Image: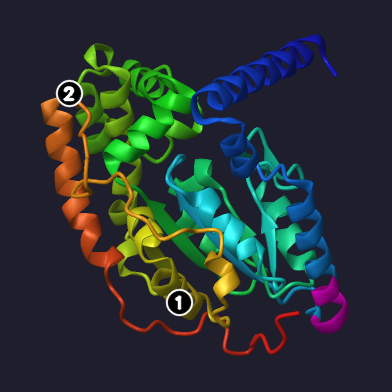
Amino acid sequence: MAADDEVSTLAYTARRVRRHLRWARTEGIGRLIEEDRLNPVDRIGTALAKRRFRRRAGRAPGSAVPVYLVGLQRSGTNMLVRGLDSAPEVEVRNENDRTLFHRFQLRPDEVLTATVQRSRHAYVLVKPLCESHRVDELLALPGLVPGRALWVYRDVDDRARSEVAKFGDANLRALQAIADGTIGRRWQGQRLDADTMELIRGHDPHRLDPHSGAALFWYVRNSLFFQLGLDQRADVLLCRYDTLVAEPAAQVRRLCAFLGFPYHPRLHAHIAPRQSHAAGAAGYQPLPIDPRVRALCDELTDRLARPAADARPVADARSDHEVADRG
């Protein structure tokens, strides 16, 4: 390893350790264990169930359906991963999986394609949050069974609180770099059209506080759902975190119908039905977000609510890949 790479790796590791320590202090060690799936009993049980599936009902390599879980960090995606990971037919490749990811970003498409093609599971769940802006391209990768995508979003205030609690002003600094033209090739600045760039500059990220910056970043990233035309695609499902925690059984049934595999209560056994802290919930306290940013977010929230509530039946993702045995 070159000296510069070694220093970079050490600095990156130090940042992660500091972030986890801060997260443990503010949210509790139990929350950290749940967040990063650190319970060895859960992990061993899950691994054994998947091994049994491969032995009894494993699919031929090349037949797995890729499912891309995308959206924005701190939007409840780990909750969905944990539920889907309990399904033996699903192979999970979370963003800390070193085969597919380097520092939470996807390795080259060839690595993704080869990994999915090798799988003997019915589905391979991949969580490329940093590549959410590429989900249309990922769905079109050659050599793979036609895939599906789940775009998850969360109430802007709830998500901004969580983002700032864990990552500090990271979103704000990214917006400042976009506005200054110094973002380079970093994922936060990719596939932004001219109107979005102008919108970011017009809101002058240098004068925003971290929560307002996180809210503006929420707007920019979730706007991609419409800018990429994902709202018009039958192979993309919009999922609202706040509805999932309020109605876990109903929402997981909706997700299972979309993916085309049988519903089972264990898929949401870890979710206790509850109200989120989103707007309209009892005791809800909105953040003092910049008024212009708040107006943008309110408009997008209303726009997202329509496809997120759409309960129309969807076509089976893989009619010739029925799952007859759940292991």
Residue toward you, 89 or 34: 34
Residue carrying label 1: 253
- Residue at disc 1, secondary structure: helix
Dot 1: few (<14), some (14–19), or many (≥20) neighbours within 10 Å? some
Asked if residue 53 is among those painted magenta in the image, a careful observer would answer yes
Q: Can residue 184 be seen in this view?
A: no
Locate residue 179 relative to residue 189 in the image: left or right.
left
Q: Is 195 rendered above or below residue 282?
A: above
Please report contact status of discs 1 and 2: CB closer than 8 Å, yes or no.
no
> Which residue sits at x=55%, y=49%?
78
Check the picture and name the quadrant holding the N terminus. Answer: top right
Residue toward you, 286 or 321: 286
Sequence order check, earlier mark of 1 and 2? 2
| Residue type at the position of mark 1 | Arg
Which color scheme is applied? rainbow
- The magenta region covers 52-57
Q: Is 279 rendered above or below residue 246?
A: above
Check the picture and name the quadrant holding the C terminus. Answer: bottom right
How far across and how far down the image is residue 122, in percent? 69, 75
Dot 2: few (<14), some (14–19), or many (≥20) neighbours within 10 Å? few
| Residue type at the position of mark 2 | Gly
> Which residue sits at x=64%, y=49%?
94
Residue carrying label 2: 202
Locate residue 108 relative to residue 238 in the image: left or right.
right
